[in-house]
Image: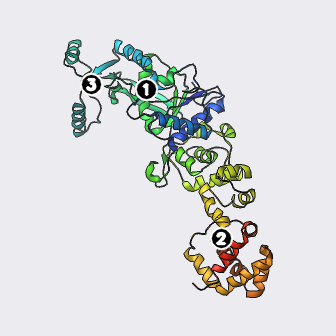
Amino acid sequence: MSLINETPLVTRFAPSPTGSLHLGNARTALFSFLWARKSGGKFILRIEDTDSERSEARFRDQLMDDMRWLGLDWDEGPDVGGPSAPYSQAERGEFYRRLFAELASRGAAYPCYCTAEELELSRKLQRMSGKPPRYAGTCRALTDAQRAERERRGSSSTLRFAIPENQIIEFTDVVHGPQRFASNDIGDFIIRREDGTPAFFFCNAVDDSAMGVTHVLRGDDHLTNTPRQIMLLNALGMRCPDYGHVGLLLGEDGAPLSKRHGSTSAHEFRERGFLSIAVLNHLFRLGHTSDVEDWLPLAEMAPHFRPQHLGRAPARFEQSQLLHWQKVSLEQLSAEAIGLWLGADDPTQFIELVRHNVMLPADAVAWRAVLRGELAPLGAEEQRIVAAAGTDFFAAAADAYEQSNADLKSLTGILKQRTGRKGADLFMPLRIALTGQAHGPELAPLLKLMAPQMVRRRLLSHAQNP
């Protein structure tokens, strides 16, 4: 199949419900979603929950909820069904068992009775002799009688795939180009765990093929998994999808994005009040070069998604860039939508005043306090400006306010005449006394919204010697 074409593609996102939706996985989901939409194809959501000890229903539900928040709707999946149901791997056990039996009957898979201690010793000896650690094939040559003896002793076993010898596995990666691996460099790998559940290498590959997935995008830490999965699918006579492995997502310090960088999941950014479209605009440009640099709504991203321009190099997630897209995204919203985002019963005049001075809902708290609360203690620079203005300045300001009818132009005119101050020397201490901050929304409309008694109290509090 051609790597980049206009025929409808089938892509998928296959998260494990062992935690929140990480931004790196969210980016992979976005790229897969856009590629399917660009081609007029299908986007599948599959839950890889065979790890019963770590998989939790609450994580599955949260993953799906965060996907919906991002707008990444799926055409087939656990909740909507589809021709390849079920879409939860925990429910596909019978399908896997049939394939295990088929491989074993052909000699393409065999039981392995090696203990964890024996495997670790083998790897240690290989490293000491300068060889790459891989399974030595200890149980591959066991006779039926030897296997029966181990079964009689109650030895537990895994199931390993028997790597074909002296083969060259070649494929063209969507991102990295032509790839070539020698089968003799790959050890026989486990496809069924000791507890009978399928390993990632196995169920991930066979489900992609069985569900008709044509193109798989994933992180390049999975690149070396691909030859294993290709050999596995070839042994089963199943179709192989095309693979693309994108560079990993890093933090600003160049290390893989993790909890130590702060918020790293879509859920955490959602809780903080980031807009989903802001997150998407940032992710869209991480490891992907589009032909459009401007802000895009999700509906317009697919035509500008260019899979041939996915990057091999790691991409860096930068909070400053996310804040840029947050600001641009907020500019697209109506006052009504901003009010809903802020999540409080704010008057329209207040929303219009602060919309250009807040990046997150928490930022509005200080401005609500300006109108109807207590101001936070002044910072060192603000204290210096207020002290430099002097108590007489604020006594005159309080008197001017009484005569101005809350009109800032009239108030500053009177104050200029009485104090001789002008420009920033007049305006800055007045703003700080009334709002507690040197910058922010226009002072004139703020002054109109403030209660007169509160304005007087704030001005007079600075008209007294500390």
| Residue 110 shows up from this direction | yes
CB within 8 Å, label 3 to label 1: no
Query: Residue 287's x, y, as percent?
Result: 55, 44
The N terminus sits in image quarter: top right
Residue where numbered disc 2 is placed: 435
Residue visible at 68% across and 43% down in the picture? 297
Q: Distance between the residues labelled 2 and 1?
A: 63 Å
Crowd rating for badge 1 (residues with CA inside 10 Å; few <14, some 14–19, many 20+) = some
Q: How far apart are marks 2 and 3 (CA)?
A: 74 Å
Q: In which quarter of the image is residue 94?
A: top left
Q: Which dot, 2 or 3, sits closer to the camera?
A: 2
44 sits to left or right of 412: left
Which SS class for mark 1? helix
Residue where numbered disc 1 is placed: 229
CB within 8 Å, label 2 to label 3: no
Instruction: Give, as a three-letter code, the residue at label 2.
Output: Thr
Q: Distance between the residues labelled 3 and 1?
A: 19 Å
329 sits to left or right of 90: right
Which SS class for mark 3? loop
Q: In which quarter of the image is residue 56?
A: top left
Instruction: Give, as a three-letter code, the residue at label 1.
Output: Gln
Residue visible at 54% across and 53% down in the picture? 318
Q: Compared with residue 155, is residue 354 higher up or lower down, i.e. above or below? A: below
CB within 8 Å, label 2 to label 1: no
Q: Identify the disc placed on residue 104.
A: none
Q: Identify the disc placed on residue 137.
A: 3
Q: Nearer the viewer, residue 339 or 345?
A: 345
Q: Nearer the viewer, residue 381 or 372?
A: 372
